[in-house]
Image: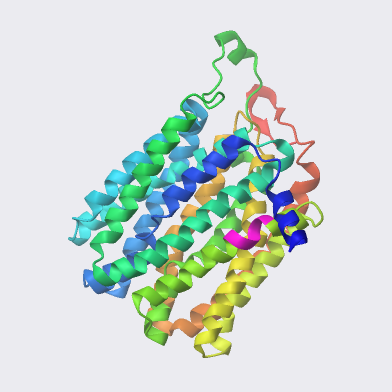
Amino acid sequence: MKKVLLLYRNAFGGLSKPAWMMSLVMLINRSGSMVTPFLSLYVTDMLGYSLKEAGIILSIYGMGSVCGSFLGGWLTDRIGHFRVQFVALTLGGLLYFLLLNLKQFEYLAMGVFILSLVNDTLRPANSASIAHYARPENMTRAFSLNRMAINLGFSVGPAVGGFLAAISYRWLFVADGATCIAAGIFFFLYFRNQQGHRPESKSRQEISDAPAVRSPYRDGYYILFAILCSCFAIIFFQLFTTLPLYYRQAYVLSESSIGALMALNGLIVFLMEMIIVYLVGEKIKKSILIAAGVLILGVSFMLLNLVQHLAILYVSMLLLSIAEILAMPFMNTIAVERSSPSNRGAYIGLYTISYSVAHVIAPFLGTTIIAAYGFTTLWWSTGALALVTAIGFYWVIGKIEPNKRTLKPIVAAGGSMVSG
């Protein structure tokens, strides 16, 4: 027991106070994560729309996420990560109360788009903030701490949400909105006097003399990396889109049982991620860790076809959680290490856009495959995509990693940028 406690102490040691406070903000925020996990059930069971229409709503949520990620990255580089996060948290919380009263399909779709846009401006700003406050040697662990807080919140949110949904779906929106606003207020009170969250002001001469900043959209390897992240996310997001429908249709689980299963994911990641990152983060190449995580993710879904028993749902969720631990923290670190302070918002913005694109594709593709061929075909398809994606990650990260410290932007004639 002493060795275990020492291991946890070492894993959490050395992290800055702002990094801890940022994680506390995300814990408050994500403890109310109740609407998104139950959105497909809300649209079909409560509002009476078809499975196809539910897929459209979820894809529109993803479109808002794409726009929000791009906007969040752009705003972060211009007005700073503090303002972006505060507005996203408070305004996003208010929008949940508005969405609660939208029932007509067109208004619901518009409300979901705006809510997702505002919510996802938070992500690039939050990542830039963590990168700013973390010590360089603790970068991956700082991101893992933040993800740990998010997953602890996510283990609470769906579990409580399942019980609230059994009473009334209305309470899901109220709880989600209230926790967003509470997180925004706490964030403002602690970080308003912190230094470094505003972009550096430069004179016109300094701006004119400075070399052009490399754009992530001209970084070929990074674009391929972002595409692969999107493929990974398409598979992973079945957790939020089609998996609850599978639980309901194949196993006839109640909302509370579905919430408990999904909360298990957050609990496992909360308990294990920091330890695993601490033990293997500096010993095994990121290309191997991420590729292994993607392969395990594919296996977690294919298992659902191989064994038909309630217990396999828990085994599958365990594997999915391990896959998340091995892949996601190191993907985030690559996005930060590939950038510089002057273009970090854009680089992280493109990384989050890759996930947002998956928000569009995952529900539409998943529900379309289910409607045409059933859940069995969907789970085999995710396994095949995971295999291809894992191979792609292993190759492209092998190209990125050796050059991450020596890569410098080269100013071509006329001021255009090419990758070094």
Q: Position of residue 46 (x, y in %)?
A: 23, 70
Residue in the foreground of this view, choosing between 409 and 202 = 202
Residue that lies at the very extreme toward the bottom in this rendered image: 308
Residue in the picture at 66% in, 31% down:
417
Left or right: 360, with 309 as reference point: left
Residue 382 location, quadrant: bottom right
Give the position of the C terminus as an image quadrant. top right
Task: Give the answer, above or below, for where 418 lies relative to 322.
Answer: above
Segment tinted magenta in the rendering: 270-274
Q: Position of residue 178 (x, y in %)?
A: 31, 48
Q: Position of residue 24 (x, y in %)?
A: 50, 45
Residue in the picture at 58% in, 79% down:
315
Task: Give the answer, above or below, for where 294 lies relative to 284.
Answer: below
Residue in the picture at 49% in, 28% down:
80
Give the position of the N terminus as an image quadrant. bottom right
Residue in the foreground of this view, choosing between 77 and 45 = 45
Label count reads: 0
Q: Is residue 2 visible?
A: yes
Which secondary structure class fits the magenta region best? helix
Q: Position of residue 297 (x, y in %)?
A: 61, 70
Residue in the foreground of this view, choosing between 17 and 302 = 17
Task: Give the answer, above or below, for where 78 lies relative to 36.
Answer: above
Residue in the picture at 74% in, 49% down:
10
Residue that lies at the very extreme toward the front in this rendered image: 2
Q: Is residue 301 visible?
A: no
Q: Residue 250 colored magenta? A: no
Residue 413 location, quadrant: top right
User: What is the basis of the colouring in this image?
Assistant: rainbow
